[in-house]
Amino acid sequence: MQLEALYQQVILQHYRHPHNRGVLDAPDAEVHLRNPTCGDEITLQLHVRDGTIEDVRFSGQGCSISQASASMMTQRLKGKPLAEADALSARFTEMMHGSAEAAVDRNLGHLRALAGVARFPVRVRCALLAWNALGEAAKQVRTNGPG
Amino acid sequence: MYVGEIRQEFPILQQQVNGHPLVYLDNAASTQKPRRVLEALDRYYREDNANVHRGIHELSRRATEAYEAARVRVAALFGITDPAELIWTRGTTEALNLIAGSWGMANLGPGDEILLSVMEHHSNLVPWQIVAGRTGARLRFLEIDEQQRLDLSGLDELLTERTRLVSLCHVSNALGTINPIREIAARAHAVGAVMVVDGAQSAPHLPVDVQALGCDFFAFSGHKMCGPTGIGGLWGRRKLLEAMPPFFGGGDMIEFVELERSTYAPLPNKFEAGTPAIAGVVGLGAAVDFLAEIGPEAIQAHERYLLGYALEQLRAIPDLRVFGPEDIAERSGVISFTLADIHPHDLATILDAEGVAIRAGHHCTQPLMHRLGVGSTARASFYVYNTTEDVDRLIEALQRARTLFGY
C-alpha cells in the first residue's frame, strides 16, 4: 500500500513528462548538484527580475522521485518571489521529515503527492536534491544580485 | 550441496523484511555470516581475548595461536604455499592502497605506465591515480567490448616496456565478467610488469589458486566471503614483499627501534603495524573453514546454476536489459540490469518493499557506467545460500515494479 502512495500517477506523469526541463540563456543563477551516493544529478537555472523568479529550468538525470520533485518544484516556482520560494522550500522539507501538517498544506499544491516519500527515509534525499539546488541558486542571486 | 541445510546456518536469513521473508541478493556488496563465524567471534572475546605476538601469558598465547592458525587456513584456500606471504589488511581497498603506496612509490617514476581497465572498482583506480600524481607515472586503460568483456585486442599496444604494473579485477563487481587473468599475467610478465589482481569478487565465488593465476599480488575482502567486516588480505610474492618499504609504521612491524632509525620485522609482520583485527581474523578463519567444507567448485557450480535460471527468466521480461557476457561460463553470479524507464533506485525501493534486497547505483564504477551509457544499474548477486525460490521472488517483484509503472 505504501508503494502505491509513493508511485502515484501524478509522480510518474512528471517523471515521464517533466515540466521546465531544458536550459536558459544567460541565467542569473546556475547550480549543479550531484548526489554522490547514487549518481543522480541536477542543473538548475533561474532568471530573476526584481526579486521574482521569472523563469526556471532544470536538467540532469535521476530517479522518478528526484525528477518529479524537480518538475513540480519548477512548476510551482515560476512567477514567485524568492522569499516565497524560501518558504515553500522550508515547508516541503518539513513534509519530507514527516510533518503531517505540511503534507496537507495547500500551498504545496501537487507537491503533496510526494508526501509518501517521508516513509522511505533513504529516498528523502532524492526528493530534496532539486530543493537543495534551489537554496544554492537563491544564495547566488542574493550574493551577485540579479541582472 | 543441500542449500536448505546451508541456509539454516545463517540466522539473519530467517527473518521477515517489510512483511516478507528476506531474499538477500546483495552479496557482491557484502555477504551474511554463518552461525560458526558468529560463534567464533563470541568465543574469542569470551575466552581468548588478548593482544598478539607480545604476551607471555596464556590468553596472549591462545590469541596469537588462533590468529596465525587462521592465516595458514586462509592461505591454503588460495593455494598460497608460504603463509608468511599473506598479509592481513582491512580488506581489498587497504590491500590495493598498500601496493600503490609501498611498491608504487618505491618503483614508479615519470615515463612509467600503470595499466588498468575501464571496468575497475574505484578502489582499484583511485589509489593508482594518487600514486601516478605523486610519481609522474601515467595511467592507461583497457577498454571493454560490446559484451562488456575486456577488449584484449589493444593489449599489445598498451603493454610495452614502459608498463611497470598491471592491475585488474579478477571478476567485475558491476558486471560479473570473469577476466582471463592467467593470459594477461603471462603477457604482463613478458614485458617485465608486475601483475596485481583485485580478487574481491572472485575469492568468495570461484576456486582461486594464486600460483595458477600467475599473478604477483592478490587482494581480497573477508566480509564478501562470510567473514566479518574490517578484515581481508593481500598475498604477494616473497621477493617483492621483502624488497618493498613498510606501508604503516608502528608496533609489531619492527625488530629493533632507536630514536633515529629502526629495523623491520620479517614477513608478514613488517606490513602489520599496530594491534590487528584479531577477532576479525579468527572470524575469517571460521568462514574459510565453512567455505572449504562446501568447496569453491560447488559454490561456483551452485551460483552458475542460479545465474542460468535467473537469466532465462529475466530475458523473458520485456524491456529488461542485462549487462555482461552472454556466455555464462564467462560470468560469476552477478546480474546488472535495467528495466524499461524505471530508474534503478525506484526498482530497489519496490523490491525492498517486497523483501528483496538488491543494489542500485553506480557500484563504485562510475567510469564503467559512463562507458555503458547509463547513470546506474540494478544489480542482483548470489551466494551459496540463495535458492531458485529467491530468484522467483526477484522476478515476481520485478513484475510488481512493471505494474506500478504502468507496464
Image: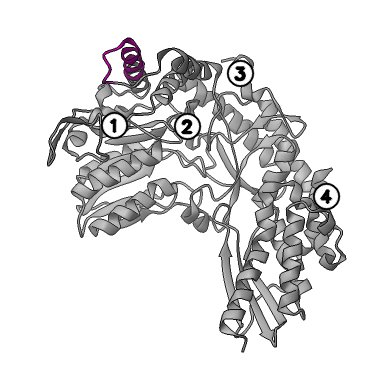
* Residue shown at 35% from the left, 19% from the top: B67
Q: Image height check: is B288 above or below B333?
A: above
Q: Which mark is residue B376?
A: none
On the image, the x and y values in percent for residue B345 come to 66, 50
Quarter of the figure that contains the N terminus of chain B:
top right
Q: Mark 1: which secondary structure?
A: loop
Residue identified by numbered label 3: B3
Q: Earlier in the sequence, mark 3 or mark 1?
A: 3
On the image, the x and y values in percent for residue B292 come to 44, 17
Q: Amino acid at mark 2?
A: Thr
Q: Earlier in the sequence, mark 2 or mark 1?
A: 2
In the picture, measured across the screen, residue A32 lies left or right of residue A51, that is left
The Cα atoms of the two marked residues, 1 and 4, are separated by 52 Å
In the picture, measured across the screen, residue B161 lies left or right of residue B115, that is left
Q: Amino acid at mark 3?
A: Val
The Cα atoms of the two marked residues, 2 and 4, are separated by 36 Å
User: Is disc 2 in the same subunit as disc 4?
Assistant: no
Q: Image height check: is B37 above or below A105?
A: above
The Cα atoms of the two marked residues, 3 and 4, are separated by 37 Å
The Cα atoms of the two marked residues, 3 and 1, are separated by 37 Å
Q: Amino acid at mark 1?
A: Glu
Residue identified by numbered label 1: B272
Region of the chain picked out in magenta, as a range: B53-68
